Amino acid sequence: MEAELFNPAQMATPVGPYSHVARVPLPGADLLVISGQLASDLDADIVGQTEQALEQLRLALEACGGRLRHVIKLTTFTTDLSRRDEVRAVRQRYFLEPFPASTLVKVAALVDPRALVEIEALAVVPR
């Protein structure tokens, strides 16, 4: 079982030497490991940045035949934990019950000083 590492054509080119998606074949499904996604507009507020990061995750999933409902784990990194309720409210618009497992982490900074949130995901997409 070899992982396939790639960058979906619908997504922006990575800003460094990494792949947006790792696809690992499982019996009857694919495990997707999706790199942390930032907003395309880093001048947006935390709500806008969260929406844009989740849209990037959606694009990665769709490139592999998946949907947001296939996400089993989210990790959200934020520089401003005091705005976590706003981040949660956006996530609740994108994910329905049962919600994926989730971790929220406060970090001192992200790769770009304007970035307020970065979101990575694990998903299992049936074949």
Image (cartoon, rainbow, N blue to C red):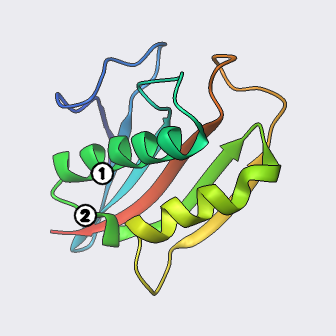
Neighbours of disc 2 within 10 Å: few (<14), some (14-19), many (20+) = some
Nearer to me, 118 or 87 = 87
Instruction: Depth check: give the residue in front, 32 or 118.
Output: 118
Q: Residue at x 44, y 49 (%)?
A: 33
Amino acid type, label 2: Arg
- Viewer-proximal residue, 57 or 51? 51
Q: Which mark is residue 58?
A: 1
Which residue corresponds to the image point at 61% horizontal and 56% vertical from the top-left? 87
- The quadrant of the image that shows the C terminus is bottom left
Q: Position of residue 108 (x, y in %)?
A: 84, 30
Residue at image point 48% right, 54% down: 121
Establish if 43 lies above or below 81. above
Disc 2: which residue: 67
Local SS, label 2: loop
Considering depth in this image, is 84 or 37 the residue closer to the camera? 84
Whether the residues at callouts 2 and 1 have beta carbons within 8 Å, the answer is: yes
In percent of width and height, residue 36 lies at: 52, 38
- State the residue at coordinates (33%, 70%): 70
Q: How many marks?
A: 2
Q: Label 1 is placed on what type of residue?
A: Arg
